[in-house]
Amino acid sequence: MEHQIKGSWHILKGKIIEKWGKLTNDDINMIDGKRELLIGVLQKKYDYLYEQAEDEVKKWEGQNPYPWK
């Protein structure tokens, strides 16, 4: 099942770019609220292993709670 952000994606885009400055607007538009795509882009941009990217997202989610679908 693909994880999708509900409703507040437009608010979270700025917070994601704040946290991960290497992400571009094109990256954010491609991610479009999908958690797995965020993890994949972080792997590519930051040269993270999957587990590292997932851990980073989990930490960020703890500070910015919102419902992933």
Image (cartoon, rainbow, N blue to C red):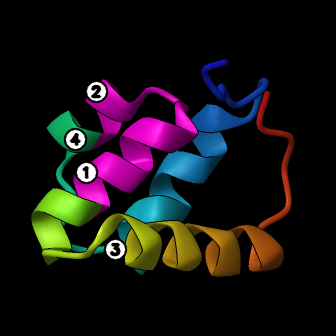
Q: Residue at x 77, y 37 (%)?
A: 68
What is the count of numbered marks? Answer: 4
The picture places residue 6, in percent across and down from the top left corner, at: 78, 25
* Foreground of the two, 63 or 39: 39
Q: Are the residues flagged by discs 4 and 3 in contact, CB closer than 8 Å?
A: no
Q: Amino acid at mark 3?
A: Trp
The residue labelled by disc 4 is: 27
Q: Is residue 34 above or below residue 59?
A: above
Q: Residue 25 appears at what percent x and percent y?
A: 22, 42
First along the sequence among labels 3 and 2: 3
Q: Give me the C-alpha separation between circle 4 and circle 2.
A: 5 Å
Q: Which residue is mark 1?
A: 41
Please, what is the three-letter code of the amino acid marked with disc 2? Met
User: In front of the other: label 1 or label 4?
Assistant: 1
Would you say 36 lies left or right of 20 here? right
Is residue 30 highlighted in magenta? yes
Disc 3 is placed on an element classified as: loop
Q: Position of residue 19 (x, y in %)?
A: 44, 78
Question: In terms of secondary structure, where does tag 1 sit?
Answer: helix
Would you say the magenta stretch is mainly helix, strand or loop? helix
Label at residue 20: 3
What separation in Å lies between label 1 and label 3 (alpha carbons)?
Answer: 10 Å
Q: Are marks 1 and 4 in contact (CB under 8 Å)?
A: yes
Q: Which residue is mark 2?
A: 30
Residue 26 is covered by the magenta coloring:
no
- Crowding near pointer 3: few (<14 within 10 Å), some, many (20+)? some
User: Range of the magenta residues?
Assistant: 28-42
